[in-house]
Amino acid sequence: MDKDHGKVISIAGQIVEVEFTENQPDLHNLLILEDNESTKMEVMKSSGPSTFYSLCLSEATNIYKGARVINTKKPITVPVGEGVLGRVMDIFGEQLDGLGEIKYSERKTIYGDYPSYADISAHQEILETGIKPIDFFSPIAKGGKIGLFGGSGVGKTLLLTEIIYNVIVLKKGVGKDVSVFAGVGERIREGQELHQILKEQKVLPLVSLVFGPMGENPAVRFLTAFTATTIAEYFRDVLKKNVLFFIDNVFRFAQAGNELAVLMKNIPSEDGYQATLASEMAAFHERLVSSQGSSISAIETIYVPNDDILDQGVQAIFPFLDSTVILSRPVYQEGRLPAIDLISSTSANLSPELVGELHNETVPRAQNLLKEAAELERIVSLVSEAELSPDDKLKYKRSLRLRNYMTQSFHVAQSQTGRPGVYVPRLTTVSDVNDIIDGKYDDVSEEKFLFIGEAKELLNGQKGEGQ
């Protein structure tokens, strides 16, 4: 057998075990089938002295026991740079949008080097989304990471799409920002809809999209996150651009890794997940950081299986985030959208240096009011609001106004709701919340706060922009 050739000895789903008696391949080397070079595999780990588990990245139907494979001695590489903007690609950098071959001057391995400690910097600036509950309770710092957590059908992807619309479309690429979107294990329909929105709004030339949708095999879904990260790193380090990195959905990344671990016969760890879950999360997240000149701001959606926030696949993501937004099914069922749990959603960016004194002081006041009202809710459900003391009744009414004020009409949902979308500046939200807590709107019915923009619309006797 030739020195750079091996043979297939077993196949289990997308895991192909290969044997190399000489010149054994390195980790992440790309293997191709000798009689079908379009069939590609990536060396994942050793399974014996001369045997290796590899991920099949193509259709496994062409592979059979005894088939000869060639070691290319190279890892997967993808095109990077200006040429990938406005394009949709897979993990190999092959186009998916029907616009012909992607032009590039350089390709990079999808397993980049982690930046050194000396190169990492913290950016002291808030990234405004125009979405009231996020900007107020879970503000995002440029160069930080925010997670949108929620079960099935509570509006994670819709919320992410609205953030993309507000930050990219409305600002029309202000400054030197570009965006990278990673579609990991989600519906191809949602990716197509996002592509259409970006194209219609003429901001697609500022965005690069990498898709590994739900229908793809777990190896492709798993590697999609690393391909998108490589593209973002090149914009940050070489072209010195600030990058907005969007990924939908990080739980699907963890899930794909678990599927592969089972096929490779790894012993599971906590909650049935792979023992390497934490290191896989770190390998992805620790590359999404800010350098001395430019930043990567990551906005992630995380599916919560069975609405169980304690699921280990979900919990493994929390340590890497600066801000968290928890979407609630009960809130969704009440018809308050976005369906955000205002008490559970938090941010490490709530400091006077980042958000200002007023914002920093108003958030705990708002959360305390909501917590006190949650305790009063049970009394109201049992014996009615009339049984509350005057002081408690005032708190309860103000909490209702605050909760309703945090609803918002989305630009990307206008065709479904019939309400035009609204963008509310962060400082306006802070001022409005402060006024609600202080009683400035005590004479205004709480129902009027639903789906408005700024609160001053009510004082002017105007209908809210989102109504």
Image (cartoon, grey):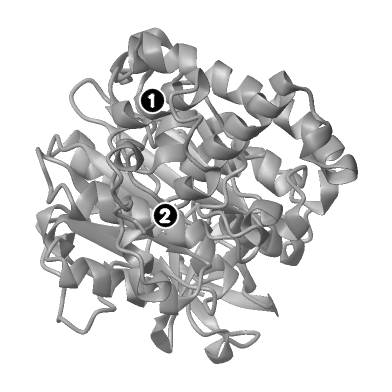
Tell me the SS state at disc 1.
Answer: helix
Q: Give the residue pinned by disc 2.
A: 160
Q: Nearer the viewer, residue 276 or 281?
A: 281
- Numbered label attached to residue 430: 1
- Which residue is drawn at the image coordinates 46% and 45% (left, top)? 449
Q: Mark 2 vs mark 1: which is more N-terminal?
A: 2
Task: Classify residue 192 as left or right of residue 341.
Answer: left
| Amino acid at pointer 2 | Leu
Q: Nearer the viewer, residue 85 or 59?
A: 85
Position of residue 335 measured from the top left corner of the image (x, y, whole percent):
59, 60
**Residue 110 appearing in the image:** no
Position of residue 319 measured from the top left corner of the image (x, y, whole percent):
60, 30
Position of residue 4 measured from the top left corner of the image (x, y, whole percent):
44, 66
Task: Classify residue 168 as left or right of residue 172.
Answer: right
Tell me the SS state at disc 2.
Answer: helix
Task: Classify residue 431 as left or right of residue 62.
Answer: left
**Of the residues tagged 2 and 1, which is closer to the observer?**
1
Callout 2: few (<14), some (14-19), or many (20+) C-alpha neighbours within 10 Å?
A: some
Q: Quadrant of residue 456?
A: top left
Q: Among all residues in the image, which is located at the extreme right? A: 382
